[in-house]
């Protein structure tokens, strides 16, 4: 697909969780403040609080808002430190696997009702070596999750960052599932200190289905978090990043994500301006 067939406005979206909405109506109001009309929607609130979020589809339709993809989280994830998320992230922990798979099945049903074709999530830290006994277990669990979405003709997007690009590429190749792709987040490569985002994008390019627009600065103390910052003020080289996307003829959505700060709408507008400048608009 040629990216020229879609204008930038038709490709830009924002992560619903970045706006910290309390209800679908609140989400509409906060989205309006960003100037964008397309969403990647967190599915867990719809599953956990149907009394509040049950009308999301109707509210979005009434306001002319497109939902381009979904996102699902996992139980018990603790992002306090890199070590805590290594222990608790994604589908890796044995103690939450059964409940996580149950919730993922419910989320897939919700995504199907919304007409979505892509749902993304953090798989958890992937073992670097096939000799690691956890490698086969993670492959088995990822295959089970992929099957849930495959049955509904949906793509599962694995979020980048918790491992290096070569490790993720090896897992994707071993998994061998046509409905498993990559949600590429350049900032996560920096936040987790897992390599150069541009090199990772080039390596993972054929697998990338969606891109998160987020920025960060790398940690100066090994083993600690980097810092998420407003797009354009971090270490992502956006001109080079979008040049690489153009070389790839990447056709997917560009979804702005902001998970820090107390001026989310303003920060998202700034991110949009950076994207527009990088595209020469």
Image (cartoon, rainbow, N blue to C red):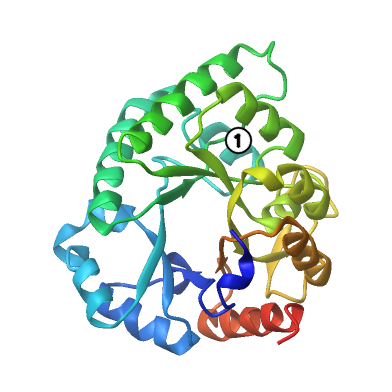
The answer to which quarter of the image holds residue 64 is bottom left
- Residue at 55% x, 42% y is 181
- Residue at 47% x, 48% y is 120
Question: What residue is pinned by disc 1?
Answer: 86
Observer-nearest residue: 230 or 143? 143
Q: Is residue 110 above or below residue 54?
A: above
- Left or right of 130? Residue 257 is left
Observer-nearest residue: 169 or 16? 169
Q: Is residue 144 above or below residue 107?
A: above
The answer to which quarter of the image holds residue 218 is bottom right
Query: Helix or strand or loop: what does disc 1 sit on?
Result: helix
Observer-nearest residue: 144 or 73? 144
Q: Position of residue 185 (x, y in %)?
A: 64, 55
- Residue at 51% x, 17% y is 137
Observer-nearest residue: 160 or 227? 160
Q: Position of residue 109 (x, y in %)?
A: 24, 45
- Left or right of 187? Residue 198 is right
Q: Position of residue 106 (x, y in %)?
A: 25, 42
Q: Is residue 189 above or below residue 137?
A: below
């Amino acid at each position: 697909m040629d990216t020229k067939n879609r204008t930038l406005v038709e490709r830009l979206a924002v992560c619903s969780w970045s706006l910290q909405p309390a209800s679908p109506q609140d989400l509409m109001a906060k989205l309006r403040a960003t100037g964008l009309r397309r969403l990647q929607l967190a599915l867990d609130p719809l599953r956990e609080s149907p009394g509040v979020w049950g009308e999301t589809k109707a509210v979005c339709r009434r306001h002319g808002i497109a939902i381009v993809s979904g996102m699902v989280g996992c139980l018990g994830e603790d992002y306090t430190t890199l070590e805590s998320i290594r222990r608790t992230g994604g589908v890796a922990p044995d103690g939450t696997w059964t409940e996580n798979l149950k919730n993922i099945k419910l989320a897939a049903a919700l995504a199907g009702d919304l007409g979505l074709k892509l749902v993304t999530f953090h798989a958890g830290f992937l073992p670097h070596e096939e000799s690691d006994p956890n490698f086969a277990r993670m492959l088995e669990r990822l295959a089970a999750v992929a099957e849930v979405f495959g049955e509904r003709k949906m793509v599962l997007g694995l979020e980048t960052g918790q491992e290096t690009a070569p490790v993720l590429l090896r897992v994707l190749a071993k998994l061998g599932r046509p409905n498993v792709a990559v949600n590429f987040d350049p900032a996560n490569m920096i936040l987790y200190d897992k390599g150069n985002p541009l090199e990772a994008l080039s390596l993972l390019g054929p697998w990338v289905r969606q891109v998160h627009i987020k920025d960060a600065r790398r940690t100066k103390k090994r083993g600690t978090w980097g810092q998420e910052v407003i797009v354009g003020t971090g270490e992502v080289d956006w001109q080079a990043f979008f040049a690489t996307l153009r070389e790839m003829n990447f056709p997917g959505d560009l979804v702005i994500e902001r998970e820090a700060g107390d001026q989310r709408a303003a920060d998202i507008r700034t991110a949009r301006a950076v994207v527009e400048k990088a595209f020469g608009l």
